[in-house]
Every structure is written in structure tokens, then in C-alpha cells.
Amino acid sequence: MPLRVLADLPVSPTVTQLLAGNVQLIPWDTRDGKFDAIYTYGHPKVDAALMDQLAGIRVISNFGVGVDHIDVAAATARGIPVGNTPGILDGATADLAFSLILAAGRRIVEGDVYAKGPSFTHYDPSYMLGREVHHATLGIFGLGRIGEQVAQRARGFDMHVLYHNRNRRPEVEQRLGVKHVSRDELLATSDYVLLMLPLTNETRGMIGPAELRQMKPTAALINAARGAHVDTMALTEALSKKTIRMAALDVTDPEPLPRDHSLLKLDNVIITPHLGSATEETRRKMAEMSVENLLAGLAGKPLVNRVGA
Ligand code: 8YV
């Protein structure tokens, strides 16, 4: 009998190809019969109740590094290893985060729409003035693997880089010339506030009305991590009232936003549809690593990358 893996279908053709008929992927809403594993491609919720319903599964493999949609503690308590894909997507995600910084500073998206639209009939040097990126201050919440790569890119733009982490990283401070500051100082002094940290109970809702009020009126909020770090209504209000200048978001809460959400009507927000790691090269590596994790777990072998190991 083929191994049965619950998966939020459709997965990419690359994943299907790599599985090469070794396992049968079963649609997410199916719950009958015996299951051997769970494969999460988007971010379907995997909680203790699901694990108990599918008793006997040997592994949960996630396509991606963030596992906030999976109750890892519940999996560990049940002896189920959870696999993810760290490391391989850092460069792509840092590229995307940096492109959001540039787009927010230099009004790239708005400029594109204008240049292609009916109103652009006359060049005017006084329109669409942006804010500089070079020599500006970038404040990174979450100087992990990806945050560090953003800091490295920021050096090439002569930016002053501040960061706030639970744990300081003296080696990175020295190597990249970044400065550890308090949460309050980061918010109050940064021209670009970048969220680049995992979603946990501590970080959920970390940017609310009070934090937005602490930011400079000229500042931009950049989120390339998880939408739920930010209170969406508070951000919508801050952008409408222009208490901050701009937001550039690769993630939202909820994701996607309802199509009639008021945030979508504002012209001082840029939203990309969770493209952080979406390059051909990185997606291929993510497919390979997540499939390796899945097959290892099914075979009762150690995962290539096990969360919390
Ligand atoms: C993925 C991500 O696109 O790795 C993550 O945590 O958010 C993204 O890189 C996503 O997980 C795929 O669903």
C-alpha cells in the first residue's frame, strides 16, 4: 500500500516530481483512513487535534522555514519530528526585504503606475519625491540569518543599521558595524523599521498603535516576516492619518486581506503576495529539502532539518 501523506494541495510540480510516486498526497480536507505523514506547502494549521486525528503519523514536513502554523510542542510531545527548510532561503528573502525598502523609499510602485497611466504626459522634476535610502537609518527587529543578510546589503547603501534582538550578536555587530539598541530607540530613530523575526506568542501584535506612534512621521514600516506581527487596523489608521509615511508589506494579517479591506485602498502602502523566498532557485531548494525531510521521517531516519533539534 502506498504511503499516505496529508497535504494542502496543490503542491508545485517540482515537489510532485521529487516524490516520484513514492507517496500518495491526500487532499487536506480528507480525514478517512490511515495517514503516514503531513506535508504543509502553504501555511495550513496543524494543531494537536489534527495530530490526534491522524494518530500514527511519523513526520510533519514543512515547505518553508517559519513553523508558526504548526504546534511544534504538541508534535514533540507525541514524538513526531517536524522538518523545515532553514538557511537556503535567506538570500532570496533578504533580497525581497531590501527591494521593499527601496520601493518604499523611492516610490517605485506608484511611479510605475503613473508612468504607464494616462496622466503622464509631461515630465515634472517636482513630482513624486521620495526619501533617501543611502545614509538613512535601518532598524531591524530580528537580526537572525535573514536579518543579517539584509544588514549586509544595507552596508552597500551606507545605511546606519540598528537592531533589536532578545540575544545580542556581538560577532555580527563587529563584522557588519550594526548597533544593538532598545526597542524604543529603534522605533524612535529608524527611517525604515524592518520586521524580520519569527512569529511567536511574544512577537504577535508587537507593532500596535503605541509602537506606530513612536515611529517618525517620515518613517516606513517594512514587514517581510509574518503579518500577525502587526495590528492591521492600527497600521491602516496610522497610514490613513499619515502618522507614518509608508508601509511595504510582503505579508499581511489575514493573508490575503479581504478584497474590500481599507488597507488596500491606501496609496502609501505597497503589498506583495508573500514573495520572500519566491525565486526559481530557492523554491527548487525548498522543494528538495522538504521532500528529503518527508522521506527521511517516513523511513524512520533523522530529518535533514528538524525544528528544535
Ligand atoms: C515560504 C516563508 O514561501 O519559509 C517561510 O517561512 O514564509 C516562505 O519562505 C512559505 O513558507 C511557503 O509556504
Image (cartoon, grey):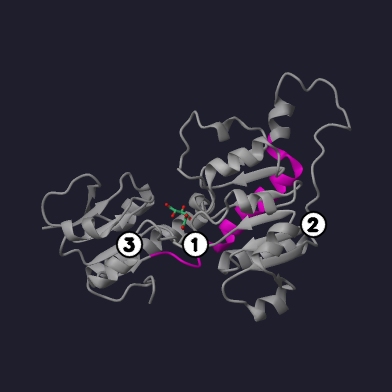
Is the CB–ligand 1 distance for label 1 below 8 Å? no
Q: Which residue is mark 3?
A: 71
Q: Provide the secondary structure element on which disc 1 rests.
A: loop
Rendered residue at 70%/76% (across/down):
173
Lower sequence index among marks 2 and 1: 2
Q: CA distance from mark 3 to mark 1?
A: 14 Å
Residue 245 in the image, given as x and y percentages of width and height: 72, 43
Pointer 2 local density, CA inside 10 Å: few below 14, some 14–19, many at least 20: some
The residues bearing labels 2 and 1 have C-alpha atoms spaced at a distance of: 25 Å
Q: Which residue is mark 2?
A: 136
User: Would you say the beta carbon of the disc 2 residue lies within 8 angstroms of ligand 1?
Assistant: no
Figure quadrant of the N terminus: bottom left
Q: Is residue 209 left or right of residue 288?
A: right
Taking the magenta stretch, the answer to whether it contains residue 106 is yes
Q: Quadrant of residue 243?
A: top right
Query: 205 or 79, which lies in front?
Result: 205
Mark 3 secondary-structure assignment: loop
Report if the CB atoms under discs 2 and 3 are less than 8 Å apart.
Answer: no
Q: Is residue 272 visible?
A: no
The stretch in magenta equals 84-109
